[in-house]
Amino acid sequence: MNLKTQILKIAQEAKKASYGLVKASTQDKNKALEKMAVGLLKAKDALIKANKQDLENARKKKLSSAFIDRLTLNEKRIEKIASDIKDVIKLQDPVGAIIKTWQRPNGLLISKKRVPIGVIGIIYESRPNVTSDAATLCLKAGNAVILRGGSESFNSNKKIVEIFRAALKGMAIPEEAIQFVSTTNRQAVDELLKLNDYIDLIIPRGGEELIRKVTENSRIPVIKHYKGVCHVYVDRFADIDMAINICFNAKVQRPGVCNAMETMLVDEKIAKKFLPLMIEKFKSAGVEIRGDAKTRKIVVDIKSATEADWYAEYLALILAVKIVSGVDEAIEHINKYGTHLSDSIITENKSNACKFLNEVDSATVYVNASTRFTDGGEFGLGAEIGISTDKIHARGPMGLEELTTYKYVVVGNGQVRK
Amino acid sequence: MNLKTQILKIAQEAKKASYGLVKASTQDKNKALEKMAVGLLKAKDALIKANKQDLENARKKKLSSAFIDRLTLNEKRIEKIASDIKDVIKLQDPVGAIIKTWQRPNGLLISKKRVPIGVIGIIYESRPNVTSDAATLCLKAGNAVILRGGSESFNSNKKIVEIFRAALKGMAIPEEAIQFVSTTNRQAVDELLKLNDYIDLIIPRGGEELIRKVTENSRIPVIKHYKGVCHVYVDRFADIDMAINICFNAKVQRPGVCNAMETMLVDEKIAKKFLPLMIEKFKSAGVEIRGDAKTRKIVVDIKSATEADWYAEYLALILAVKIVSGVDEAIEHINKYGTHLSDSIITENKSNACKFLNEVDSATVYVNASTRFTDGGEFGLGAEIGISTDKIHARGPMGLEELTTYKYVVVGNGQVRK
């Protein structure tokens, strides 16, 4: 079978399975998930063996030790994946909810009802746990899923899918609801992205280059999870202790994630008081500061920020700092340089807070809290498939509800249009 | 200025204007719309003059009289466009609504708030009233709009935009919120579709080829309004009089629109009773019937349907008819050949009705009503920008609410992540 036929077959099988999934009850889906979790624990030796092949290949390719660590599956990590599936079981099923109902003067009863999207393609880089996360979240929301993982975790991903599909045998959920692209040929992705008759949504998870490539080539709608250039703006009316605490948290608590602060904006009216204290604290935690000219007049022994720094997602203990004339300049800077993900203002002034919350064009905007809360778990949405930087369909943390769409169900008793 | 620079400038101006629009109140927007309607009426002579140029060109190109009719603007039609704007003024502003609010155990107050999308590009074919519809609906939902109309109505479209922008001078809405691609060069569209940094959504309105071209080339999310291959399925438990009445309405009342029936599916158990009566009624209205082999055994003097007929959107007094073994085969046929827009079952049996409503994968599904109700006005949503055949973001009739997105607004008092 050539590649094109192989990918087409996968997509067609997934579409067919998605029609089967529409008939599944919440209980059907939870039972299937339960069996998948049990299957994973039972087959952990086989999975560890498959993972070893990936690890060997990774060592041969001299991939970094951080990469190899993320790639590694051991007993404990497999138990964690299984326990994550149990968390998905506990999540409320969004499917079937009536969003609204109304009656028309002609008697038609119209309901807007939440339904699965259909078939979702997930294209991701190399952490095998994503295979399980993506499959189980899509399935709980009633969708068939096509998984295309990174080549480095190919054997682990393949084994996880084998285990899941074996678990689905004899259950109400067709095993074809979980599809795996079982080739590392890059052309497979190009073929997949053409199949808009069978695939309803593509979610790429990975680096900027992957996302850009998918977006440029896809005929299927794509929801992007781009990088996070997040800001905290310390307003002239900020409580200084609170500002120091929040900025420190936003930068230092976990610098390698998309909702960490990358640029700190400081109102010129508070800069002299705030910056020396703040920067001292950052320095003691090993944070490299890159300041604009005004900042460097107040704190002299720091590096100079260039235009490129305002666009930078460091994902490291580096922070760009800029002094602005007030809330308007802060908003302008964030809308221009930011990635519209997670931005915060620290202020005790209601009018500035409202202005910032209203005018900053980001998925999540905060007053007096850390940008680090932008996360499905922290929002109480449960597990998330990612954090969307798009505005269409899903914005910010993308949970089960965002993996659904709606349909209009109209009940009549003979109505015709006049 | 070369084309690339010209299109980039348009997109950048629109983005900037969209940030201004976020600050506008409902009253600001309604006042602007009011002035635009008044402007249109005041300048109707100039608009009719501009339209005359388009009509002359159309006649030179020997375009069809139906086309020329749709292109024509006269006093009455301009008054209709102005009165449509007044209807948009009356629509409820969706922006600012709080979709939900909840508090987290750590005290963070999270609100999901409805906000404008930002910049919307509308690429449409040749009816000048679309220029006004698209601009006013986008503006009411707080969005800047980039209009790219068909070359045949170029002069009319340009004049309408000039009138609108003149009306916005001195108002709270920046005139740059309405942008017009003032060239008929086709490359302009390709340039537009690359500008995902400035444009948030593209809505193509027109024929299949236009939509396909836009979808294949766009880096910006696209919401498609494809064709409608709609079905009515007459179940064995149908009330025959009701079935005849609804099928006739769905096919004949206005055959040239996307929510008209194109294929009628009939349960084999009711075919002998239903089909002779139904087809006679269709024939008396001039409907050409194309039936499958089973249908032609019951009603002999009709044409034979081929595989291509099941995919066909006739938009004319032609109907494909197929006899199926029951509700399951009907659902399978609709999901395979349909365009997922508007499909109806006629039945008095609750279980078959529920099955159909649940398993037919369409934007709107009906029991005992005509497919022709799939329309923003008929649904009570007010004016619509189109009827989406996509599943992502908007499905079915797309009104003001579907021209918005949401953001999370989070209010804290010093919370940091642990």
Image: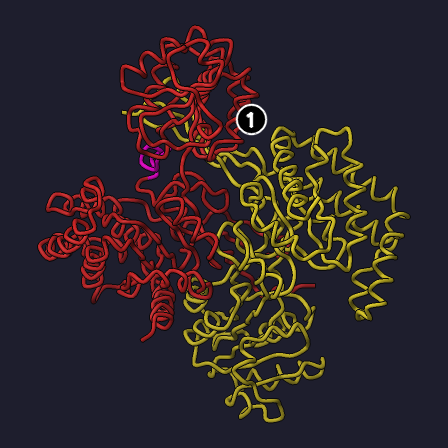
Chain colours: A yellow, B red
Number of labels in the image equals: 1
- Residue B323 screen position, x and y as percent: 49, 16
Give the position of the C terminus of chain B as an image quadrant.
bottom right
Horizontal arrangement in the rendering, residue A389 relative to residue B321 (left or right): right
Q: In this orientation, does residue B254 appear?
A: yes
Q: In this orientation, does residue B367 appear?
A: no
Residue B402, compared with residue B276, is above or below; it is below
Horizontal arrangement in the rendering, residue B74 relative to residue A213 (left or right): left
Residue A87, compared with residue B199, is above or below; it is above
Horizontal arrangement in the rendering, residue A225 relative to residue B145 (left or right): right
Name which quarter of the figure residue A12 lies in: top right
Instruction: Report which residue position mark 1 lands on.
Output: B332
> The residue tagged with tag 1: helix, strand or loop?
helix
- Residue B218 screen position, x and y as percent: 46, 57
Residue A53, compared with residue A147, is above or below; it is below
Name the foreground residue: B126 vs B13. B126
Name the foreground residue: A344 vs B4. B4
Name the foreground residue: A102 vs A313. A313
Horizontal arrangement in the rendering, residue B332 relative to residue B52 (left or right): right
Is residue A229 inside the magenta stretch? Answer: no
Identify the residue shown where x is 29% and y is 28%. B254
- Residue A367 screen position, x and y as percent: 52, 65
Name the foreground residue: A42 vs A50. A50
- Pick out the residue farthest to the top: B273
- Pick out the residue farthest to the left: B45
Give the position of the N terminus of chain B as an image quadrant.
bottom left
- Residue B398 screen position, x and y as percent: 39, 43
- Range of magenta residues: B373-381
Q: Amino acid at mark 1?
A: Glu
The chain ID associated with circle 1 is: B
Identify the residue shown where x is 52% and y is 75%. A234
